[in-house]
Image (cartoon, grey):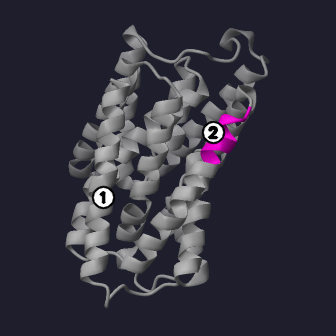
């Protein structure tokens, strides 16, 4: 099954590359604003961070604003989805090949996230953005504390480091429901990475298992989203292509860095990411409430 996913990811990567290159060549006299080198560096940094689980969208947005690469915020969602699609697919290909997660678990959670995002676009977007951000933020903070206590064995009840590469029975059902919700929440701006990491760990799986699950989940979404952004010309071609070109080596280097870390260090890295993300969501909820 993992091999089938691998070929599907390669197919999506080729599809995305053809769409992007054809559009850039067709409109080579209208590539939009931006600097090739600066945008490429942004792609490298953002996708390096994405590969180790931090995420790329917020970081890319911040760097584009600081460097004044993009002059039209309406094209930002298109830049993010189109520009990072191939690097994210590269992440998924690497991790689905190297980290052997149980096939049933992997496929079930990926499909749950994709279906969740479809339902989310119809129903979840009606929820209060402030409330969602606040409760997800606090949930992530609590999870990070529990993970730290578990990792340091302060609470014996939580046991030692996790080693499972798959879920069965009730845990698999919980994982499917959880990733369905995370996929839905992506439509209101709640990233899937940190919640997925937290859930996988709390269900007893090794933190490394979260990487192919969360990356394949997002890899299945972005090329589909890119179709409309490219068709509607709702992105900056130069910035998106430069981010793609810079992002691919960022992914490859970061994946080697992550794979060479001791599993205990990976766990602490995941805890830090989840804690940081939780704080960011709480701060965003307060900013949204006062806006």
Principal SS element in the magenta part? helix
User: Dividing the image into 4 quarters, which one contains the N terminus?
Assistant: top left
Q: Nearer the viewer, residue 28 or 117?
A: 28
Where residue 144 appears, as percent x and y from the top left, is 65, 34
Question: Within the image, what quadrant is residue 234 found in?
Answer: bottom left
Q: Is residue 168 magenta?
A: no
Q: Which residue is mark 1?
A: 16
- Give the label on residue 104, or none: none
Q: Residue drawn at (52%, 69%), measured in percent from left and top?
A: 61
Where residue 205 appears, as percent x and y from the top left, is 55, 20
- Give the label on residue 141, or none: 2
- Asked whether residue 63 appears in the rendered view, the answer is yes
- Asked whether residue 113 appears in the rendered view, the answer is no
Please, which residue is most extreme toward the bottom here?
29
Where residue 282 appears, as percent x and y from the top left, is 58, 52
Magenta residues span 254-261
What is the C-alpha distance between the residues marked 1 and 2? 36 Å
Where residue 288 appears, as percent x and y from the top left, is 48, 64
Q: Is residue 260 magenta?
A: yes
| Element class at badge 1 | helix
Q: Earlier in the sequence, mark 1 or mark 2?
A: 1
Q: Is residue 280 above or below residue 202?
A: below
| Element class at badge 2 | helix
Q: Horizontal placement of 6 versus 67: left or right?
A: left
Q: Nearer the viewer, residue 18 or 202?
A: 18
Q: Horizontal placement of 135 versus 270: left or right?
A: left
Q: Horizontal placement of 187 versus 242: left or right?
A: left
């Amino acid at each position: 099954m993992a091999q089938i996913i691998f070929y599907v990811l390669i197919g999506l990567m080729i599809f995305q590359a053809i769409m992007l290159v054809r559009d850039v060549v067709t409109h080579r006299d209208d590539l939009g604003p931006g600097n090739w080198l600066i945008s490429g560096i942004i792609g490298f940094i953002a996708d390096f961070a994405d590969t180790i689980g931090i995420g790329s969208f917020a970081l890319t947005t911040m760097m584009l604003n600081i460097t004044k690469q993009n002059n039209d915020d309406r094209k930002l969602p298109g830049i993010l989805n189109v520009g990072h699609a191939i690097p994210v697919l590269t992440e998924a290909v690497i991790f689905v090949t190297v980290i052997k997660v149980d096939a049933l678990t992997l496929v079930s959670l990926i499909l749950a996230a994709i279906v969740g995002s479809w339902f989310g676009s119809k129903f979840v977007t009606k929820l209060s953005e402030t409330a969602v951000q606040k409760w997800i933020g606090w949930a992530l903070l609590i999870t990070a504390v529990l993970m730290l206590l578990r990792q340091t064995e302060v609470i014996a009840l939580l046991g030692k480091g996790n080693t499972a590469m798959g879920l069965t029975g009730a845990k698999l059902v919980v994982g499917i429901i959880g990733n369905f919700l995370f996929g839905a929440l992506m439509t209101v701006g709640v990233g899937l990475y940190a919640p997925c990491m937290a859930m996988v760990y709390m269900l007893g799986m090794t933190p490394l298992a979260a990487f192919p699950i969360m990356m394949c989940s997002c890899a299945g979404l972005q090329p589909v989203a890119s179709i409309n952004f490219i068709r509607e010309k709702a992105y900056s071609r130069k910035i998106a292509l430069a981010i793609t070109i810079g992002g691919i080596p960022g992914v490859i280097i970061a994946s080697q860095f992550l794979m060479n870390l001791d599993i205990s260090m990976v766990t602490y890295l995941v805890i830090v990411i989840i804690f940081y993300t939780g704080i960011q969501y709480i701060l965003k909820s307060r900013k949204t409430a006062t806006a």
